[in-house]
Amino acid sequence: MRDARGCIAIPLLCALAVAGCGGERQDAGAPSGQFDLDVTAASFPAEQRMAQASTLKLEVENTGDRAVPDLAVTVETESGEVGQAPVAFAQSTDDPTLAASARPIWVVDEGPPGGDSAYANTWAVGPLGEGQSRTVEWKLTAAKAGRYKVNWRLSPALEGDVSLGDGRTDGSFDVTISDEPVPARVGADGEVVREEAGR
């Protein structure tokens, strides 16, 4: 009797285990297909100065016939050295005396609201409905003099089998940061007021 129950119980447990291991695919709810986006305006001052505030701004429009699930923007400053990975508003360095592996070119004073993601170079700013537009911007302060190329590109989502249509979805800015001091004056309240660019 015990052997008979055991013979029934073991296959039943195996069947339950297999059913539990199967389940739904992790990417079952991920978006798929083509989405149509277009950057109608992109701006970032080409001439900047050390300690000068500026704004990198993209005007993004959903030109398709369905909502974009989670508009994401990746920003990368081209590396000054061959073989170094690009960083958003910085450049990678092999200098062992630095605590961080990247040296900031700009300080990010304020990024797109709620846009932080698990990716260091990418901001996810949420869904964008059919026919809707959104301004995506970063408020920055120049921190290192030199000439730089900043590349940007869009994605309709951070996951899933997605693609983009024929709109303008990537681009770049060539920027020169001068080491000349930013013009400043003392305001009526006694605080130092510095010149701003692109705001």
Image (cartoon, rainbow, N blue to C red):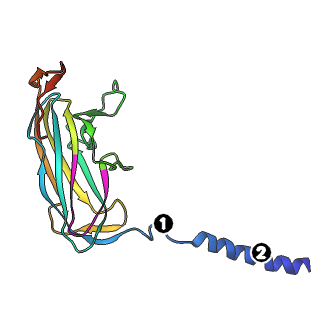
Of the numbered discs 1 and 2, the one sitting upstream in the chain is 2
Magenta stretch contains residue 127: yes
Callout 1–callout 2 Cβ contact below 8 Å: no
Prevailing secondary structure class for the magenta stretch in the rendered image: strand
**In this rendering, is residue 50 above or below 186?**
below
Task: Identify the residue at image location x=30%, y=50%.
Answer: 122
Q: Which residues are magenta?
A: 123-137
Provide residue 169's location: percent of width, then percent of height: 18, 60
Residue at which label 1 appears: 26
Residue at which label 2 appears: 10
Q: Quadrant of the C terminus?
A: top left
Three-letter amino acid code of the residue under disc 1: Gln
Residue 98 occupies quadrant: top left
Provide residue 19's location: percent of width, then percent of height: 63, 74
> Closer to the camera, 66 or 11?
66
Magenta stretch contains residue 131: yes
